[in-house]
Amino acid sequence: MPTAPTGARSRPWLSYRQVTMTLAVLLVTVPAIVLFPGADHLGDGLRAGVTGWSILAFAVVAVVGAALKGISGFGYSLLVTPVAALIIDPTLAVVVLAIPPLMLNVFQVGETGTGRTYVRQNWALFAFGLLGSVVGVALLSTKPDQALLSVLVALILLAHITFQLTRRFATTPRAGHPALLSLVGAVQGFLLGAVNLGPVLPAYLQTFERNAQRYIGGMSLFFAVVIGERIVQMWLQGILTEYRIWLGSTIALVTLLGLAMGTVIRRRFAIDKRRLDAIITVLLLATALNLLWKAVPQLLS
Protein backbone atom coordinates (compact mmCIF):
# COMPACT_ATOMS: atom_id res chain seq x y z
CA MET A 1 0.00 0.00 0.00
CA PRO A 2 1.46 3.38 -0.97
CA THR A 3 2.16 5.70 1.90
CA ALA A 4 1.52 9.42 1.99
CA PRO A 5 4.53 11.71 1.79
CA THR A 6 5.93 12.79 5.12
CA GLY A 7 5.01 16.42 4.44
CA ALA A 8 1.41 15.43 3.75
CA ARG A 9 1.17 13.44 6.99
CA SER A 10 2.52 16.31 9.09
CA ARG A 11 0.48 19.04 7.46
CA PRO A 12 -2.37 20.16 9.78
CA TRP A 13 -5.94 20.10 8.52
CA LEU A 14 -6.21 23.83 9.20
CA SER A 15 -3.27 26.18 9.60
CA TYR A 16 -2.84 28.59 12.50
CA ARG A 17 -3.48 31.42 10.04
CA GLN A 18 -6.76 29.94 8.80
CA VAL A 19 -8.06 29.15 12.29
CA THR A 20 -7.21 32.58 13.70
CA MET A 21 -8.64 34.55 10.78
CA THR A 22 -11.83 32.44 10.78
CA LEU A 23 -12.21 33.02 14.53
CA ALA A 24 -11.85 36.77 13.96
CA VAL A 25 -14.75 36.79 11.50
CA LEU A 26 -16.95 34.56 13.70
CA LEU A 27 -16.35 36.81 16.73
CA VAL A 28 -18.44 39.52 15.07
CA THR A 29 -20.65 37.60 12.63
CA VAL A 30 -22.42 35.56 15.33
CA PRO A 31 -23.34 38.55 17.58
CA ALA A 32 -24.38 40.62 14.54
CA ILE A 33 -26.93 37.93 13.63
CA VAL A 34 -28.02 36.66 17.05
CA LEU A 35 -28.37 40.08 18.74
CA PHE A 36 -30.09 41.88 15.83
CA PRO A 37 -32.55 44.25 17.61
CA GLY A 38 -35.10 44.41 14.79
CA ALA A 39 -35.66 46.98 12.07
CA ASP A 40 -37.66 49.26 14.38
CA HIS A 41 -34.86 49.53 16.95
CA LEU A 42 -31.74 50.03 14.84
CA GLY A 43 -31.13 53.55 16.13
CA ASP A 44 -32.18 53.09 19.75
CA GLY A 45 -28.72 53.75 21.15
CA LEU A 46 -27.76 56.64 18.90
CA ARG A 47 -27.94 60.32 19.65
CA ALA A 48 -31.13 62.09 18.58
CA GLY A 49 -30.83 63.86 15.24
CA VAL A 50 -28.35 61.47 13.67
CA THR A 51 -29.17 61.27 9.95
CA GLY A 52 -28.72 58.49 7.43
CA TRP A 53 -26.01 60.55 5.73
CA SER A 54 -24.11 60.73 9.03
CA ILE A 55 -24.25 56.95 9.40
CA LEU A 56 -23.10 56.52 5.79
CA ALA A 57 -20.20 58.92 6.36
CA PHE A 58 -19.25 57.02 9.50
CA ALA A 59 -19.32 53.71 7.59
CA VAL A 60 -16.95 55.19 4.98
CA VAL A 61 -14.59 56.38 7.73
CA ALA A 62 -14.71 52.91 9.33
CA VAL A 63 -13.73 51.27 6.03
CA VAL A 64 -10.89 53.78 5.49
CA GLY A 65 -9.68 53.24 9.07
CA ALA A 66 -9.65 49.46 8.54
CA ALA A 67 -7.72 49.89 5.28
CA LEU A 68 -5.10 51.92 7.14
CA LYS A 69 -4.96 49.16 9.74
CA GLY A 70 -4.32 46.64 6.98
CA ILE A 71 -1.55 48.75 5.47
CA SER A 72 0.29 50.01 8.54
CA GLY A 73 -0.83 47.82 11.46
CA PHE A 74 -2.63 50.62 13.28
CA GLY A 75 -4.80 53.66 12.60
CA TYR A 76 -8.32 52.28 12.96
CA SER A 77 -9.18 53.47 16.47
CA LEU A 78 -7.17 56.68 16.10
CA LEU A 79 -9.24 57.71 13.11
CA VAL A 80 -12.63 56.12 13.75
CA THR A 81 -13.17 56.70 17.49
CA PRO A 82 -12.94 60.53 17.33
CA VAL A 83 -15.28 60.63 14.31
CA ALA A 84 -17.77 58.38 16.11
CA ALA A 85 -17.56 60.71 19.10
CA LEU A 86 -18.83 63.50 16.84
CA ILE A 87 -21.78 61.41 15.58
CA ILE A 88 -22.80 59.57 18.75
CA ASP A 89 -21.89 60.51 22.32
CA PRO A 90 -18.20 59.93 23.19
CA THR A 91 -18.82 57.29 25.88
CA LEU A 92 -20.93 55.18 23.51
CA ALA A 93 -18.27 55.53 20.83
CA VAL A 94 -15.52 54.40 23.21
CA VAL A 95 -17.58 51.37 24.31
CA VAL A 96 -18.99 50.24 20.95
CA LEU A 97 -15.73 50.66 19.06
CA ALA A 98 -13.94 48.16 21.28
CA ILE A 99 -15.40 45.34 19.18
CA PRO A 100 -14.17 46.13 15.63
CA PRO A 101 -10.52 46.47 16.76
CA LEU A 102 -10.75 43.07 18.47
CA MET A 103 -11.77 41.48 15.19
CA LEU A 104 -9.22 43.45 13.16
CA ASN A 105 -6.35 42.58 15.49
CA VAL A 106 -7.19 38.87 15.78
CA PHE A 107 -7.37 38.82 11.97
CA GLN A 108 -3.92 40.37 11.67
CA VAL A 109 -2.47 38.04 14.32
CA GLY A 110 -3.38 35.18 11.98
CA GLU A 111 -2.29 37.02 8.86
CA THR A 112 1.18 37.67 10.32
CA GLY A 113 1.50 34.31 12.13
CA THR A 114 2.29 35.94 15.49
CA GLY A 115 1.73 33.76 18.57
CA ARG A 116 3.09 32.39 21.84
CA THR A 117 6.74 33.07 21.06
CA TYR A 118 6.10 36.82 20.95
CA VAL A 119 4.19 36.67 24.25
CA ARG A 120 7.05 34.79 25.95
CA GLN A 121 9.59 37.32 24.71
CA ASN A 122 7.49 40.34 25.76
CA TRP A 123 5.51 39.04 28.74
CA ALA A 124 5.94 42.30 30.70
CA LEU A 125 4.24 44.26 27.92
CA PHE A 126 1.16 42.02 28.08
CA ALA A 127 1.00 41.71 31.87
CA PHE A 128 1.13 45.45 32.53
CA GLY A 129 -1.09 46.16 29.54
CA LEU A 130 -3.85 44.04 31.11
CA LEU A 131 -3.36 45.80 34.46
CA GLY A 132 -3.62 49.22 32.82
CA SER A 133 -6.75 48.17 30.94
CA VAL A 134 -8.50 47.12 34.17
CA VAL A 135 -7.84 50.57 35.65
CA GLY A 136 -8.94 52.33 32.45
CA VAL A 137 -12.26 50.48 32.21
CA ALA A 138 -12.90 51.17 35.90
CA LEU A 139 -12.53 54.90 35.13
CA LEU A 140 -14.84 54.60 32.12
CA SER A 141 -17.50 52.89 34.27
CA THR A 142 -17.75 56.05 36.40
CA LYS A 143 -19.35 57.74 33.34
CA PRO A 144 -17.00 60.71 33.00
CA ASP A 145 -18.21 64.02 31.60
CA GLN A 146 -18.75 63.73 27.82
CA ALA A 147 -17.03 67.02 26.99
CA LEU A 148 -14.08 66.12 29.20
CA LEU A 149 -13.81 62.75 27.46
CA SER A 150 -13.82 64.48 24.07
CA VAL A 151 -11.03 66.81 25.17
CA LEU A 152 -8.99 63.85 26.44
CA VAL A 153 -9.37 62.07 23.09
CA ALA A 154 -8.33 65.24 21.26
CA LEU A 155 -5.26 65.73 23.47
CA ILE A 156 -4.16 62.13 22.84
CA LEU A 157 -4.46 62.73 19.11
CA LEU A 158 -2.45 65.95 19.33
CA ALA A 159 0.26 64.16 21.36
CA HIS A 160 0.44 61.45 18.72
CA ILE A 161 0.66 64.06 15.93
CA THR A 162 3.47 65.85 17.78
CA PHE A 163 5.41 62.60 18.01
CA GLN A 164 4.89 61.88 14.30
CA LEU A 165 6.27 65.31 13.38
CA THR A 166 9.32 65.20 15.67
CA ARG A 167 10.33 61.53 15.88
CA ARG A 168 13.81 60.21 15.10
CA PHE A 169 14.33 56.51 14.53
CA ALA A 170 16.90 54.39 16.37
CA THR A 171 17.56 50.87 15.15
CA THR A 172 17.98 48.01 17.63
CA PRO A 173 17.27 44.28 17.18
CA ARG A 174 14.62 44.08 19.92
CA ALA A 175 12.07 46.56 21.20
CA GLY A 176 13.19 47.71 24.55
CA HIS A 177 14.16 46.89 28.12
CA PRO A 178 11.56 44.95 30.20
CA ALA A 179 11.14 47.84 32.66
CA LEU A 180 10.41 50.36 29.91
CA LEU A 181 8.25 47.82 28.12
CA SER A 182 6.20 47.39 31.32
CA LEU A 183 5.61 51.14 31.57
CA VAL A 184 4.58 51.37 27.90
CA GLY A 185 2.23 48.41 28.34
CA ALA A 186 0.57 49.92 31.42
CA VAL A 187 0.03 53.33 29.78
CA GLN A 188 -1.19 51.77 26.54
CA GLY A 189 -3.56 49.43 28.40
CA PHE A 190 -4.99 52.30 30.45
CA LEU A 191 -5.67 54.43 27.37
CA LEU A 192 -7.32 51.51 25.58
CA GLY A 193 -9.50 50.83 28.59
CA ALA A 194 -10.52 54.44 29.19
CA VAL A 195 -10.85 55.96 25.71
CA ASN A 196 -10.27 53.13 23.18
CA LEU A 197 -7.15 54.91 21.92
CA GLY A 198 -3.49 54.27 22.38
CA PRO A 199 -0.77 55.64 20.13
CA VAL A 200 1.82 54.97 22.85
CA LEU A 201 2.68 51.40 21.83
CA PRO A 202 2.80 52.10 18.06
CA ALA A 203 5.00 55.12 18.72
CA TYR A 204 7.30 53.11 21.00
CA LEU A 205 7.65 50.19 18.60
CA GLN A 206 8.18 52.53 15.65
CA THR A 207 11.19 53.91 17.51
CA PHE A 208 12.84 50.48 17.82
CA GLU A 209 11.24 47.75 15.73
CA ARG A 210 12.37 47.69 12.09
CA ASN A 211 10.82 44.35 11.06
CA ALA A 212 7.40 45.23 9.58
CA GLN A 213 5.93 41.76 10.04
CA ARG A 214 6.99 41.56 13.69
CA TYR A 215 5.88 45.15 14.31
CA ILE A 216 2.37 44.64 12.91
CA GLY A 217 1.91 41.14 14.34
CA GLY A 218 3.18 41.96 17.82
CA MET A 219 1.13 45.12 18.10
CA SER A 220 -1.98 43.31 16.87
CA LEU A 221 -1.51 40.49 19.39
CA PHE A 222 -1.12 42.97 22.25
CA PHE A 223 -4.24 44.89 21.21
CA ALA A 224 -6.25 41.66 20.79
CA VAL A 225 -5.37 40.43 24.29
CA VAL A 226 -5.97 43.75 26.06
CA ILE A 227 -9.14 44.65 24.12
CA GLY A 228 -10.50 41.15 24.80
CA GLU A 229 -10.05 41.71 28.53
CA ARG A 230 -11.59 45.16 28.20
CA ILE A 231 -14.71 43.80 26.49
CA VAL A 232 -15.23 41.15 29.18
CA GLN A 233 -14.80 43.73 31.95
CA MET A 234 -17.23 46.19 30.32
CA TRP A 235 -19.79 43.41 29.90
CA LEU A 236 -19.46 42.35 33.56
CA GLN A 237 -19.90 45.97 34.69
CA GLY A 238 -22.99 46.48 32.51
CA ILE A 239 -21.37 49.07 30.23
CA LEU A 240 -21.47 46.83 27.16
CA THR A 241 -25.15 45.98 26.58
CA GLU A 242 -26.55 43.55 24.00
CA TYR A 243 -27.46 46.45 21.69
CA ARG A 244 -23.93 47.86 21.90
CA ILE A 245 -22.42 44.44 21.20
CA TRP A 246 -24.67 44.13 18.13
CA LEU A 247 -23.79 47.63 16.92
CA GLY A 248 -20.06 47.11 17.38
CA SER A 249 -20.20 43.71 15.65
CA THR A 250 -22.12 45.15 12.70
CA ILE A 251 -19.60 47.97 12.32
CA ALA A 252 -16.84 45.36 12.46
CA LEU A 253 -18.37 43.44 9.55
CA VAL A 254 -18.42 46.62 7.47
CA THR A 255 -14.75 47.21 8.23
CA LEU A 256 -13.74 43.77 6.89
CA LEU A 257 -13.85 45.25 3.40
CA GLY A 258 -11.37 47.95 4.34
CA LEU A 259 -9.08 45.49 6.13
CA ALA A 260 -8.98 43.22 3.09
CA MET A 261 -8.20 46.20 0.82
CA GLY A 262 -5.41 47.42 3.10
CA THR A 263 -3.83 43.98 3.44
CA VAL A 264 -3.78 43.50 -0.34
CA ILE A 265 -2.25 46.95 -0.83
CA ARG A 266 0.47 46.26 1.77
CA ARG A 267 1.37 42.90 0.24
CA ARG A 268 1.32 43.84 -3.46
CA PHE A 269 2.28 47.49 -3.75
CA ALA A 270 5.11 49.70 -2.59
CA ILE A 271 3.64 52.23 -0.19
CA ASP A 272 5.12 55.70 0.20
CA LYS A 273 5.13 55.63 4.00
CA ARG A 274 5.91 59.33 4.37
CA ARG A 275 2.97 60.31 2.20
CA LEU A 276 0.66 57.89 4.04
CA ASP A 277 1.80 59.26 7.41
CA ALA A 278 1.19 62.80 6.18
CA ILE A 279 -2.39 61.98 5.11
CA ILE A 280 -3.15 60.28 8.43
CA THR A 281 -1.65 63.18 10.36
CA VAL A 282 -3.78 65.75 8.53
CA LEU A 283 -6.95 63.70 9.14
CA LEU A 284 -6.14 63.28 12.84
CA LEU A 285 -5.35 66.97 13.25
CA ALA A 286 -8.65 67.99 11.67
CA THR A 287 -10.53 65.55 13.91
CA ALA A 288 -8.75 66.71 17.08
CA LEU A 289 -9.43 70.38 16.35
CA ASN A 290 -13.09 69.61 15.61
CA LEU A 291 -13.45 67.77 18.92
CA LEU A 292 -11.86 70.68 20.83
CA TRP A 293 -14.05 73.20 18.97
CA LYS A 294 -17.18 71.41 20.15
CA ALA A 295 -16.10 70.30 23.63
CA VAL A 296 -14.14 73.23 25.09
CA PRO A 297 -17.10 75.67 25.09
CA GLN A 298 -19.15 73.04 26.95
CA LEU A 299 -16.44 72.72 29.61
CA LEU A 300 -16.19 76.50 30.02
CA SER A 301 -19.93 77.09 30.20
Image: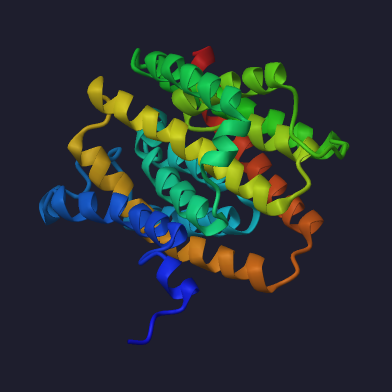
Expressed as whole percent of the image width and height from the top left, the position of residue 132 reads: 50, 18
Q: Is residue 269 left or right of residue 20?
A: right
In this view of the protein, which residue sits in the foreground, 179 or 274?
179
**Residue 74 visible here:** no
| Picture residue at 45% right of the left edge, 25% below the top | 193
**Residue 284 visible here:** yes
Expressed as whole percent of the image width and height from the top left, the position of residue 147 reads: 47, 22
| Picture residue at 45% right of the left edge, 18% below the top | 136
In this view of the protein, which residue sits in the foreground, 50 or 97?
97
Expressed as whole percent of the image width and height from the top left, the position of residue 40 reads: 11, 52
User: Is residue 143 depicted above or below 276 in this figure?
Assistant: above
Q: Is residue 145 left or right of residue 76?
A: left
User: Is residue 81 depicted above or below 132 in this figure?
Assistant: below
Q: Is residue 97 left or right of residue 76?
A: left
In this view of the protein, which residue sits in the foreground, 134 or 295?
134
Quarter of the figure with the N terminus: bottom left
| Picture residue at 44% right of the left edge, 42% below the top | 84
Seen as rendered, the residue at the extreme front is 1
Q: Is residue 44 left or right of residue 225?
A: left
| Picture residue at 59% right of the left edge, 20% below the top | 187
Expressed as whole percent of the image width and height from the top left, the position of residue 265 reads: 63, 69
Q: Quadrant of residue 164?
A: top right
User: Is residue 3 depicted above or below 96 in this figure?
Assistant: below
User: Is residue 298 depicted above or below 103 in this figure?
Assistant: above
